[in-house]
Amino acid sequence: MRHGYTTGSCATAMTKAALQGLVTGEVPEEVTIYLPVGKYATFKVSAFEEVDGGIMCETIKDAGDDPDATHKARIQSTVYFSKEEGIHLDGGIGVGRVTKPGLPVPVGQAAINPVPRKMILGVAKEGLDYYQLKNGIDIVISVPDGEEIAKKTLNGRLGIIGGISILGTRGTVVPFSSSAFMASIAQAISVAKEAGCDHVVITTGGRSEKFALKQYPHLPEEAFIEMGDFIGFTLKNIARKKIPKVSLVGMMGKFSKLAQGVMMVHSKSAPINFEFLAEMANRVGVDKETQQEILQANTASQVGEILQGNDAFFEALSKNCCYYALNHSNAELEVSTSLYAMNGDCLGKAENIDKLDENDWYRG
């Protein structure tokens, strides 16, 4: 699949183009920069204009084949001569501002992450040295549609207000990259910790989060973290931050895998194990005929429908999720699990488990 480029790379390239236009009076049609991943990339200048004595250059972000919220976004950099020495970087319209601690950017600053910040300042210094300028410069990164795009991201919950973040550690976007999602999970946990949360709720997606919000209405929004398929990674990061209590909220498909110790629950890496579910049913006294139905089921949701109302089964499955979560995190932690059906009915729970019970823990 086709790779793309980060907002950080686009902002860096447009800073180089705008500085060249400001100094020489000629804006280039394209510029080439060196990316952190260790290769060169060329960016077209799709638009430019003079703004209050400065030069604004714009490029259209290409995220490749990744379903990135910022694909086709207009990324702008405006460069001005400054009365003060040095290079001064800030965010303009559509670039969010950090309002909560726990992120890699201090509260009050524009949400331009450390690697893009280093890239932008780096090309600016190269330009000042190349043109032998004594002047300082001001750089303002903007994304005209950034505030609207940010509504499709978790920025608001992380405390990034007014637009998107300028991101990227490699400079390139890898289609359907796990690393970007994992980075957002780690940031969300860090924000929760800094906000004083001693209880976080981790969910597998938007639907399960809606159920979780109703179940834990007293918790602040920072406490709710979407982990997707990355259960093990999320638990390890929670343990590392020494957050003492975690509640897992999800549905049969992914949590039936967690109940057997699977910590990365994507369908491609971990299919549903119907033999495991049938044996769990056997352990709580489900009859042989129903066990056979479970073995012949097509989905975990179907198993949930077959056993709906059997509190003992869903409690046992929820407990197994807790035990494997405790075992994997290897930390002083109190774990709860809630299993939901697709329609929002709570199938079963296991609450406030803080130690492993070898007699109660089924290792299928």
Image: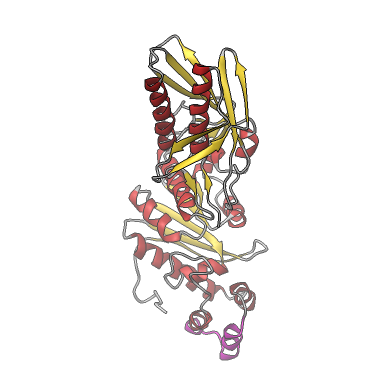
Q: Is residue 131 above or below residue 29?
A: above
Residue 123 falls in which quadrant of the image?
Answer: top left
Q: Residue at x 62, y 21 (%)?
A: 49
Q: Quadrant of the C terminus?
A: bottom left
**Can see residue 220?**
no
Left or right of 97 in this view: 84 = left
**Residue 264 coordinates in the image, percent (x, y):** 45, 64
Taking 138 as reference, is 60 above or below it?
A: below
Image quarter of the N terminus: bottom right
Residue at the limit of the structure toward the bottom, as seen here: 288
Q: Residue at x 49, y 66 (%)?
A: 265
* Residue nearest the observer in this picture, 167 or 163: 167
- Across and down, in percent, residue 7 comes to 52, 38
Decide which of 152, 117 is in the foreground and name it.
117
Residue range in magenta is 282-297
Give the main secondary structure, helix, strand or loop, of the magenta stretch: helix
Q: Position of residue 357 (x, y in %)?
A: 35, 71
Q: Is residue 67 magenta?
A: no
Does 289 lie within the magenta span?
yes
Q: Quadrant of residue 353?
A: bottom left
Q: Residue furthest top?
A: 83
Q: Nearer the viewer, residue 134 or 73?
A: 134
Residue at left offset 54%, top offset 31%: 96
**Image location of residue 120, percent across then percent down:** 44, 30
Q: Residue at x 61, y 17 (%)?
A: 50
